[in-house]
Image: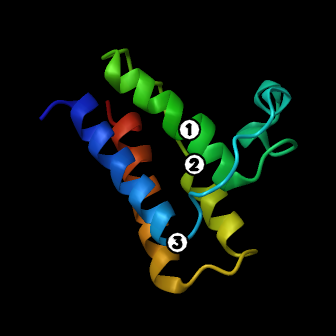
């Protein structure tokens, strides 16, 4: 399995975790939300929105195109901080963090 296939598998795992945690079903943010210049679009989207509509979508496109991986990825700390402020049960917190950590490592190690 190549790096792009591993990335797609990891993204599917994150999607499943988000669905199970009740963090997947949401409306697409308005087009203006995607033009944010803040890290994680923090001024225009919630972190789950950013994960679903920016992070996951862009990484799927990258993997589908077999494009070069970014130089690094470090989303886990932002997710951990977000999860301290929302009611998500501990098993889902752990699964979500593990999934994002896997993606961070797959990208950074390539």
* Left or right: residue 48 compared with residue 24: right
Within-10-Å neighbours for mark 2: few <14, some 14–19, many 20+:
some
- The residue at the point 87 percent across, 43 percent down is 43
Quarter of the picture containing the N terminus is top left
Quarter of image, res 25: bottom right
Q: Residue 14 placed where, x, y %?
A: 42, 55
Using the image, tell me which numbered label, if any, was put on residue 85: none
Furthest toward the bottom, the residue is 90
Q: Earlier in the sequence, mark 1 or mark 3?
A: 3
Label 3 secondary element: loop
Q: Of tags 1 and 3, which is closer to the observer?
A: 3
Task: Give the residue pinned by disc 3.
Answer: 21
Q: Earlier in the sequence, mark 3 or mark 2?
A: 3
Q: Earlier in the sequence, mark 1 or mark 2?
A: 1
- The residue at the point 78 percent across, 46 percent down is 45
- Camera-side residue: 74 or 103? 103
Quarter of the picture containing the C terminus is top left
* Left or right: residue 85 compared with residue 66: right
Task: Give the residue pinned by disc 1.
Answer: 55
């Amino acid at each position: 399995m190549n790096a792009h296939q591993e990335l797609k598998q990891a993204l599917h795992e994150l999607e499943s975790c988000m669905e199970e945690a009740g963090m997947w079903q949401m409306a697409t943010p308005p087009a203006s939300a995607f033009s944010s210049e803040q890290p994680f679009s923090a001024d225009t989207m919630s972190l789950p929105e950013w994960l679903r509509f920016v992070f996951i979508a862009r990484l799927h496109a990258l993997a589908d195109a077999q494009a070069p991986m970014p130089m690094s990825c470090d989303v886990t700390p932002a997710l951990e901080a977000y999860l301290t402020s929302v009611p998500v049960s501990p098993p889902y917190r752990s699964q979500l963090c593990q999934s994002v950590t896997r993606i961070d490592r797959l990208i950074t190690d390539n």
